[in-house]
Image (cartoon, grey):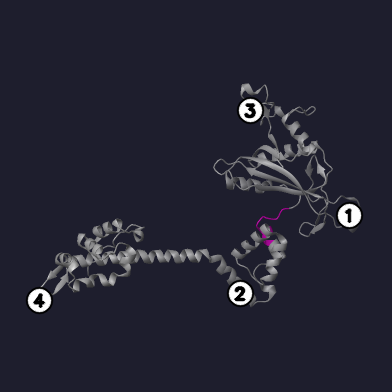
Amino acid sequence: MLPTFPPLALPENVLSFEGEKFFELVNQTCGEIFKELMEVLSINTVHKLLLVENDILAVFQKKYKELEKITQRACLHLDDDTIMLKPGLRLDFDRFIEALHALTKSFQLNENDDSHNSYSFLIAFIENIFSNLVKNKNNYRYSEAVMHFAQSLYILGGRNVYEFVRLNLPGAIPSMPTLSESLGKAGARIEEGEFRYNELHDHQKSCGYDIAVCSEDATAVIKKVTYNAATNTFTGFSLPLERGIPVARHFQTDSFDELKNWFENEDKTNYLNVHIVQPLIASSPYSSPFLLVAYGISNNFEAIDVLNRWIWMFEKSKQSNVHIVAFSTDCDPRYLLAMRLATGFFAKFVNISLCDRKDVLDIDLPKDWSAWFFMQTRQVFFCFQDPT
């Protein structure tokens, strides 16, 4: 077996070498003679060398005045003026060129892989369309990547955008019933009035936080009643509150007369109330918030309902290993009164002292603040008013 030399190790960025850096590389790998040859031939980059590699050694076969001294040192000479490049120099040069080619090929493979990865979803998306076009509509199938895309499109774009894309790209994304089923399996389906504390606990473990701020806000919505077949409930009526907590699945019935009575006597919700938990993570100040609950309400509630709800949410969140340190909401007078009662800001709960709890926050205010900054030094949680 013929002996072989190990591959020549070159820097990863060798393909960008030029000028003095390139000449120094040639000197280290091929010797002083080839360094001088590169200078005479005006080859000052790796790119140029690879383009003219087949012409380099051929220059020794002719007598160029500019190369006389280099040829004299690099070659063996016979009496009949025949010359031959010294075998050791030829071997060094061949190893150098071979290593450059191997590195170039490696970069090309990596670029091809990156290009394939960049378009991997597009390829899967188009393949899924062509696969479905030859099938009956009832037999359409969708890959996992396409299902994830469909879920994201629906969540970010809404139903109208989703239906527009689906109708104009036949076989591209699943129908609404199929999508709803996949969202339910993924845990993305949110039931009105149901607090998602189990999911909050999972979110807390995955993100690694233990304190958070809970914001509450209501937005006006168009009055509309819809039916959820999965839970046999009607959504769109204003959920009743028990100590400030919405009663989930309150409008659930099999009686047409009861449903008729609801439509005639119950308030249809004109506000959607949403509670969001924002993790407080020092290493990740822009961490994604978590949707805790959403439900329809009317304007019939009091400040005590708000405060009872906050205290209940504070205690339930602790069971999910999340300590709510503050609640944030808008400037509705009922919310402001709940804030004053919670913080003791010129207001007090009758026969109840929130500051006597064991889980309160002890606040160390600077002594020189006492003349102008009013705050109880023991707080269950802070309260913030939204700027808008």
Residue at image point 79% right, 51% down: 249
The residue at the far bottom in this view is 134
Q: Residue 363 carries which label?
A: 3
Residue labelled with disc 4: 80
As measured in the structure, the alpha-carbon distance from the residue carrying label 2 to the one carrying label 4 is 73 Å
For disc 2, the marked residue is 131
Mark 3 residue element:
loop
> Residue at label 1?
263
Q: In this view, does 192 lie above or below 105?
A: above
Gap in angstroms between the C-alphas marked 4 and 1? 114 Å
Q: Where is residue 161 in the image (x, y as percent from the top left)?
A: 70, 63
Q: For marks 3 and 1, give the one nearer the viewer.
A: 3
Locate residue 13, reporting x and y percent: 36, 58
Give the side of residue 151 with respect to residue 269, left or right.
left
Asked if marks 4 and 3 touch (Cβ < 8 Å), the reply is no
Q: How far apart are marks 3 and 2 (CA)?
A: 64 Å
